[in-house]
Amino acid sequence: MKILLVLILLLPTAFAINLTVDYPKNVLLNSEFEIGIYSNSSESFDIKIDIFEDEKRISRIWNGEKWASTMYYLINDFSSEKTYQLKTENHIGIADLIVKLRKDKDVFIFGPYQINIDKSNSENNEIEN
């Protein structure tokens, strides 16, 4: 009986995943930016990185070949640490960044993290003298 109790108490910690998400707090609309994902696990996971505004998906991710919808997981694409290229579209203001890791049938959700999207224009990109 004691062994069963110990196993039940330790089981949740066996699947604990700590994740650090390094992202810019302010980005420009339709401009590329990087998100760094760091984990305490060396296992391989499917990953999904989404940016939402009122439940509407407003981001695209570079999948290595093209800008793709963030609706889908990148299969076996994350293990321990990696940098991803994203861009936002169709929204100015505050949005929610959510990261999901999937291993078999287990899904681990991190966030929401707030990100501010500013309108891009040539004035914002000029260097002051």
Image (cartoon, rainbow, N blue to C red):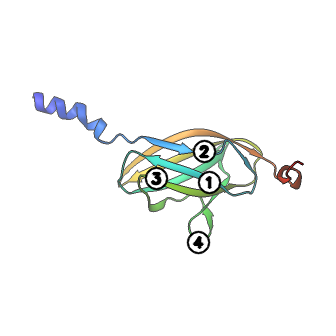
Q: Which comes sooner in the sequence, label 3 or label 1? A: 1
Whether tag 2 and tag 3 are in contact, CB under 8 A, the answer is no
The residue identified by callout 1 is: 34
Q: CA distance from mark 1 to mark 2?
A: 13 Å
In this picture, residue 95 sits left or right of residue 111: right
Q: CA distance from mark 3 to mark 4?
A: 20 Å
Between circles 3 and 4, the one closer to the viewer is 3
Q: CA distance from mark 3 to mark 1?
A: 13 Å
Q: Which comes sooner in the sequence, label 2 or label 4? A: 4
The residue identified by callout 4 is: 65
Q: Nearer the viewer, residue 83 or 62?
A: 83
Q: CA distance from mark 2 to mark 4?
A: 23 Å
Residue 127 image offset from top left, x and y in percent: 85, 51
Which dot marks residue 101?
none
Callout 4: helix, strand or loop? loop
Q: Please, what is the three-letter code of the amino acid marked with disc 3?
A: Glu
Q: Which comes sooner in the sequence, label 3 or label 4? A: 4
In this picture, residue 14 sits left or right of residue 57: left
For mark 3, does the 10 Å Cα neighbourhood hold few (<14), some (14 to 19), or many (20 or more) residues? some
The residue identified by callout 3 is: 81
Which dot marks residue 97?
2
| Quarter of the view holding residue 45 | bottom left
Q: Please, what is the three-letter code of the amino acid marked with disc 1?
A: Glu
| Quarter of the view holding residue 17 | top left
